[in-house]
Every structure is written in C-alpha cells, then in structure tokens.
Image (cartoon, helix red, strand yellow):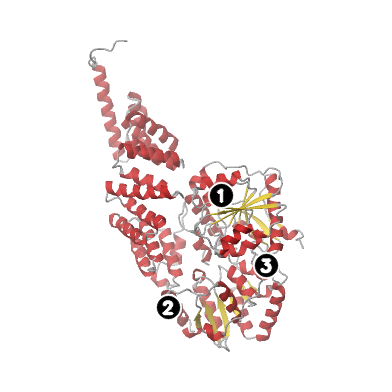
Amino acid sequence: MKRPSRIPPARPNQHRQASLVQKVFAQVTALYQSNQYTQALELCRSKLLKLAPSHPGGLLYAGVISYLSNDLQESEHYLKAAAAAGNSFDAYTNLGLTLAAMHRLPEAESAYRRAVALNPRAAQAWNNLGNILKNSFKAERRQEALECYRRAIAANPGYANAHNNLGHALDSILGDKAGAEESFRAAIAHDPNYLQAHLNLADILERSGRPDDALNSLRQALVLQPNNFQLIGRILGLRRGLTDWDENQGPAMSDFLAALPQGDSSEFQPLNLLAWPEIDAATQCRLAGLFGRTRWAAALAVPPMVSTVASARNGRLRVGYLSADFRNHPVAHLVTQVIAAHDRENFEAFLYAYGPEVDDAERRQLITAADHFTVVSRMEDQEVATLIRDDRIDILVDLTGYTTHARPGICALRPAPVIASWIGYMGSLGEPRLADYIIGDAIATPPANAWQFSEALALMPECFQPNCPLTPLAPPPPRSQEGLPDNAVVFCSFNQVFKLTPQLWDDWCEILRNVPDSVLWIAPGSSEVIRSNLLKETRKRGVAAERIVFAARKPLAEHRARLALADIALDTFPYNSGATASDTLRAGVPLVTYMGETLVSRMAGSLLHALNLQELCTTSRRDYVELAIALAKDAAKRQAIRQRLGEQLTTSVLYQPEKFAAQLEQLFNAMHEQARIGRRETIDLTRRSAPA
C-alpha cells in the first residue's frame, strides 16, 4: 500500500479527547500528590485509562498506587504496560520494586538494569540494584554492588540510604571498617532519623573495639526514636555484653518489654533473647519466627523444592549436615566424631560447609569423617538448595540456626523432605518451614515443653549433646601459675560474657560472701571495660574485688588441663554451659546448675542427668546458691562426687561417639518413618530400648 504523502490534520474530536485526557491526568496527579491514593487510582481506572488505555503516565500512577496498596499483581500488570507504552525508566524502577516485593529477585534485577540503562543517573534504581547484588554470595556480583552504590551517590550525594548500603557493603564485602564508618556517618548526616544507619554505625564501632562510642551513637538515636524496639534491644544487648547493668542509665528491660513488636516483622536478632531471664519461652519463639519470616521472606514465599512426604528408602539413608562452623569451632568439636562414627552400611553423610573458608585441623578431620564434603560458601541459597535436592538428601540437619553466618534461606527452600535443627542454635527457630524437628532429650526438651517450639520434638534416649572421646588430659599446672590461691575454694565459670546477668552476679556474690575462703575464676576476655564493670559490680555486692580471678586465654588443650584446679563449677542461667560444661565435667569438676523452662536453661542439667549426677541440678535460684555453699563447705562430699563423676565418664554416652551415633541414627530412622506417612510429631526414643 502506498504511504500517504502527508499526515492528515487531526480532527476536532481528537483535539477534544486529547484535551480531556490531559485534564483527567492533571486531576490524577493532583490527587496523588495530596496522598489521596484511592481516589487517584479510581480516576485512573474509571476514566483516564478508558480514554487512553496506553497512557504511560496513567499506567505508571496505577502501578505505583497498586504497589502502595500492596496489590502487587495489579501493580506488575500496570507497570509492565507503562514500560511498554513509554519505555520509561520510572516504570522499570517501580516494576523492580514490585517484583522484589513479590520475591522475584532475578526479574527485579532485570527491571533495575533496564532503568539504569535508560537513565544512568537514576539513583534509586542503582541503589536497589546494589541491594540485590549485595545479598549474593558470588564475589563478582558483590563487587558490582559496591559500584552500584557509588553510582547512586554520584547521582544523588544526599541519598542517605545509598550511603548506608555502601557502608554495609564495604564492611561485609571488603572488611573495610573505616570506610564503612565513614559511609554510615554520611547517611546519618543526611538523615539524622535513619535508624538502620545508627544501628550499623554502632555495630562497626563495637567490632572496632570502641564500645563506648557505639553506645553513645545508639543513645543519640534513642533520643530521636525513644520507643523503638530494635534500638532499645540493641542498647540493652550492648550494655549487657559490657556487663554494664546500671538500670539508671537506661533504657531498662521494662522499656524493652513494653516496646515488643505486635506486628508481623522484626529484624531483632533472637539469639540475644536466649540469655535474658526476663524473656519467656513463648516470646522467644514468637520473636524468632518474626525474625525468620522477615529476613528470609523471599525463600519462604516460593513453593517447597521437594515434598515433605518422603519416598521409600532406597539403600542407605542420606543425611546432610549444613553448617557455617565446620572449622575450629565448638559445634565442630562436638559433632566431628559422631559423623565419623556413622554406620556406613546404612547411612551416608553429606557435609555442606558455608561461612569462613578455612583450612584448619578440624575441617580436615571433618572432610575425612564424611562421605561427601562440599564447600558452598560462594553459592547462592538457591544453588545450595538445588545441590542438596540433587544429592537426594533424606534428612537435612541444620547446625547453625540463627547464629553467626546463618543462612536459613537454604532450609526455607525445603530441599529435603525432613529438616532438623540441632546443636548450633539452642532455641526454636519459630517458623515451621525452617525445621520439622529440634533434636533434644527428655531433660533438655521434655514433652511437656513442646509448646515452646515451632518444631516437633525429637528426643534422644539419653542426651542431645555429643562430645569428643575421652582422652588423657595433661596434668594441671600449679594454682599459682593461674593466679589462684593454694588453699582457697575455687569456684569457676568459663562461659562467655553475654551469659552473665545481674541476677546471676547477685547469686555468685552471695555464694562468695558465705564462703569466705573462696575465689571466683572466670574468663571475661581481655576487655578492660568488662573487667572494670565486673569488679565494680562485685564491690557493690559487698565482695572484695581481689576475690575475682581473671583467667588468661590459653590453647584448648592447656585450658582443659587447668580446669582441674577448680573445686566447683558454677553454671550460668538462663543460658547454661554447653561445650564449656562438657569440658568442666571431663576435668572431673562438679558442676552446679539451675534448670529453668527453656532449652538453653536445661542444657547442663541434661549432661548431669546423663552422668547420674542429678543431685547437682536445682530448680530455683535459692537452691542453686545453697547447694554451691554446702558443697564448698564439705570437701569430703566434693571428693565423693569427683569419684563418681570419674566412674560415670567412662561409661556415659556423652563421651562415646559410636554409641551416640547409633542413637542418633535411630532418631533419623524414626524421622524418615514419619515422613513416609506425612507425619510430623514428637519422637521420643526414651521410650525405646537404646543400643548397647
């Protein structure tokens, strides 16, 4: 067909319609700018887009307002149409936001890339693209994230969010704490109310050995947001980590409890809550679930990768262990020999290691212990989950939970029909999709306490915590070498500082006051701030500071040998000793514990029951104090307990990895049997006969 030689003039009705479209669009714009979103969207749908179905501005407004109304599917529809109609970088930027909110991150990344290609100075698109890339585990994508944030700041130097994100990336990707601090301070300078920047700055300052500066930064933010739950909790956590217990300095625990979130999201790290006696088990579980669903929402939003109904067993049961701690770490110390002891005729062990990439003796031992050992640190969660699925894992055991370097997003994708949580995180994950079972025992996690967990209980017949085999310890050094008096009663506790609480220190000082010829031997680390605070708190309670003896850091073998110098070990509460208790008992030292209702407050009690030393378990603070005092004043009784402890050590499952592995395999078999019929209920092996 021959093309016309000229474009015919517009007809009058076309002019009128164009004018009407412009008028309606102006009305939509006015409504949007006055935050009347419902009316603006209704006018778009009922009039503007009927007059001009491909109007780029109308489609953009409809998409943005639908996003703000959380109608994400409608938002996607309108924004894709807007992009097609006008090829607008605004449409692609907002489409990226919508797709990210729908947890479709690869598509969101593509939308942001289209946006920055259309407008290289689109600061928000560069920033959002950086956020997707930063969360990758691939080095080249993480490096690209840094460049994205720098491009965003170049386009908009006052963009506080981009400064904050650059700081986080500099820290997590390059380990550049000085650069990160500078970026966080820039974010706060541009937006003094920016909570996350204050929190990130405090974290950097604390990890740089400047806890007082970190606390000052958080207090400045608290003036701006006095009722913010996350901020109050962070200040409390930092102060308790410094053993700064002065309630008059604020905020108080009552402020934290009053600010507890009632909504459906939380970024507060639940590990902190396990050590706070004011937080009950139900609250711990609820906040853990909020944290998991907030942080790993994208993985939880997609369908499970495999069915939770297991297929029939075909040959060996394939057990996967997933951890950030397959290295010189307490978790590895506990599980290595158990993994090595698996019955290879009936079980196949797969280890998936993420977190720090190291080549130490513990990792080399684990590589030898397992049938398969794969480093997955630089793989995305989806790739790791796909690998686990393709390995046809029957039972996946998460040994990290919500602790350092945690990647629950892998388990959230459900790459195995059964997932169990064990050892690494001593509490409920709070989200049923992250784990079907928590491995415990009748003392640590009694059936009556099942309400505390989103997981079903899987109870070992004797104790949930394994240990290394007994090996001869080196002779202990003279007491004088450790700064201990020769003739005093020595109480000890080698737990981490975060487990210390004002209530615990009250009780320990009461014990010292009632046993005049005694000292308390502890290892709070090298921080002078912490040591000074502890001595101040000791004097406040009427005990001379000289009765607190600080232990120097020693290699593990030397540390285990010196433990025998103590007369009595005092457990911490509510967060009990774990591996620390095992080392203390291995050295023949009686351990006094106070058992509460939570798993972390019953760990040491589980160990003592397994050693038939139930008399060292108490169920109240008063009984705890009185038992410690009574033992301190009765050397003959202490010696008798040491004798019994020595006898029990040689026969208990605690230090026999082969026996423990056989019991654990019984538990795995029971989990698989339940999964075959689609069940997820308490498994209690204490009602079955344990292997000899």
Q: Earlier in the sequence, mark 1 or mark 3?
A: 1
Left or right placement of residue 385 versus residue 111 in this view: right
Query: Which image quarter: residue 93?
Result: top left
Instruction: Indicate the quadrant containing the N terminus: top left, top right, bottom left or bottom right.
Output: top left
Residue 27, given in percent of the width and then of the height, sits at 28, 32
Label 1: how many residues lie within 10 Å, few (<14), some (14-19) or many (20+)?
many
Q: Vertically, is 302 above or below 565?
A: above
- Where disc 1 sits, the SS reads helix
**Mark 2 or 1 closer to N-term?**
1
SS category of the residue bearing label 3: helix
Residue 411's tag is 1
Residue 608 versus residue 164 in the image, above or below: below
Report, in whole angstroms, how far the alpha carbon at label 2 lies from the one at label 1: 43 Å
**Residue type of the residue flagged with mark 2:** Ser
Q: Nearer the viewer, residue 224 or 490?
A: 490
Q: Earlier in the sequence, mark 3 or mark 2?
A: 2
Query: Residue 177, position in %: x, y?
Result: 37, 61
- Residue 292 drawn at (x, y percent): 51, 52
Residue ID at (37%, 56%): 170
Q: Residue at x 45, y 61 (%)?
A: 258
Residue 654: image tag: 3
Q: What residue is pinned by disc 2?
A: 532
Q: Nearer the viewer, mark 3 or mark 2?
A: 3
How much space separates mark 1 and mark 3, taking CA atoms?
28 Å
Say which amino acid is labelled 3: Leu
Can residue 53 be seen in this snapshot?
yes
Q: Which amino acid, by three-letter code, is at mark 1?
A: Cys
Mark linked to residue 522: none
